[in-house]
Amino acid sequence: MSFVDLDVHANLRIARLAPAICLLLGPLTLLAQQPPDSDASGLRAIYAQRETQASPGVRDTLAKLRARARSEHWTFQVGYTSALDTPLEQLTGVIPPSNLVALARAQNENAAAILLNEQFALRTQGTERRSCYDTLAVFDWRQHGGETPVENQKTCGSCWAFATAAAFESNYRINTGTTIDVSEQEILDCNGKYSCKGGWWAFEYIKKSGGITSAVMYPYTAVQGSCQQKPKMYIEDTYGFVQKDGLTPSIDEIKDALCSHGPIVAAVRATDAFRAYVAGVFNEHAKECTGTPDGSCINHVVTIVGWDDRKNAWIIKNSWKTSWGVRGYMYIGYDSNNIGFMAAWVETLPPQ
Amino acid sequence: MFSPYRLRFGGILLQILGLTLALTEMHTVAALERKYIVVHEKDNRAELRMRSSQTLIVDLVSQPGTGYTWKIFRFDETLWKSNRLDASDIKELVKGHVLRERVQSGLPGSEEEQVFQFVPKMQGSTEIEIRYVRPWEPAVPARAFKLRVELTN
């Protein structure tokens, strides 16, 4: 058996002399080519030089930053550092969609107008929603016609597609009484933005593409492929964020959204303990989420299907098969592991 | 004919050569004195020889949003002391340039780093196996990472 020997025992006697000779002789002919000073003024000169070759986007960013520096009396300078070549989301941890607050507010305004125009309350008054009140101590959509099967995303990081589909299917069932199975693979292949390496809700994709096909027509493979055009069988009406800015909502806001629209999608921090959960109320309060900005610790997406005030917990549906947790579900403490970040609801339309 | 321009150009080449050789030497010295040996998933099924004074770091990528995680399946406890490193330990390794800083996409479902440390107790020949499993279904790993190691003096 041959092993890779990590210790290199080459004879380096000549090599050890050569660099010294070259390094001594080389600079004699290079006196006219000294690099800029490495002090602050030297660095500023380097950044200034880089800036002359910067893209219009970088120049625009710097102009805005300098305007802020003047108006807010910053005591530091800005310049074209290499960090400006890297998107902010790659320098930080979790990436909420760009302009999340503006997006959430605009979408919620848009959704409210749509629902008002459709006399949403009137349309949905005969549904199981009437059994849900946010003053109830316990409410579980599984016992009120909102349950759909627990799925398995396998090794693909498509939790975002599964949660999107789960909320869509539950809302459709609550609205029509019919159980459907929409295609997570269509979302994965066709959304144009996200992949098996992660993503955010795909309600915007379903809305813009005119609906979604079924899982039978477009089955899940756990690998992103090229987008196939299939008949759109189920139509989205609109969607919205539970908290006006898209951040983590209060307990009352989540309960209200659950009663109004059915199960909702929400982000959470999945840890080793989360993966190992089998029963009880999960109240880990992951250290990664303690003292960090809202949403900065999350790495997974689930569907909230109900609550239990006696346990101070949400009931969540995962996409890790029924062999995980309690038949695929978990009780998670109201404020544990940043559950609820970017919570969103969806409304579907009945068949035309 | 002698030209100052040629001399200057030759000087640049000479200096580049010198720097290259100097860096090569530094790299070699670093390998001899290196405290940590780092392996990644691309090194799966590799066979390596390391000193028992060195520490083995196994740096693997997982996606917590899938439910899968890397778990040590097999290693010889008489030869190694092992532990999984937490985020602060990993930061220290990155700061000490043992591990390179990995850019994360920051999306739910995205990749994260799982790092294991193996500290040799004595010399010997051994195998390490780490499996990518869901904790509630350990018998069906999605992937496996195996390493054959010879620990020398």
Image (cartoon, coloured by chain):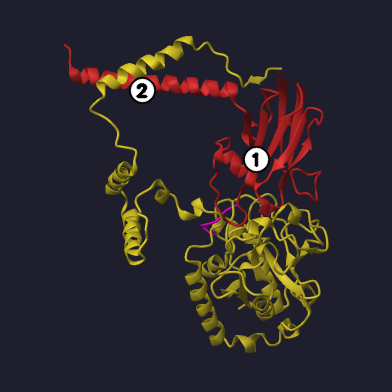
- What span is colored magenta in the figure? A191-196
Q: Nearer the viewer, mark 2 or mark 1?
A: 2
Q: CA distance from mark 2 to mark 1?
A: 36 Å
**Position of A96 relative to B7 (above/below):** below
Q: According to the image, label 2 marks what residue?
A: B16
Q: Residue at x 60, y 78 (%)?
A: A352
Residue A21, labelled with which disc?
A: none
Q: Residues within 10 Å of mark 2 (few under 14, many from 20)?
A: some
At label 1, counting other C-alpha atoms closer than 10 Å, the crowd grade (few under 14, some 14-19, many 20 or more) is some
The colour one sees for chain A in the rendered image is: yellow
Look at the numbered disc 2 and give the secondary structure of its residue: helix
Task: Measuring from the top left, give residue A70's x and y in whole percent.
Answer: 32, 63
Q: Does A35 sit left or right of A197 as displayed?
A: left
According to the rendering, which colour does chain B have?
red
Q: Is residue B104 visible?
A: yes
Residue assigned mark 1: B60
Q: Nearer the viewer, residue A179 or A196?
A: A196
Q: Amino acid at mark 2?
A: Ile
In the rendered image, residue A321 lying in the magenta stretch gets the answer: no
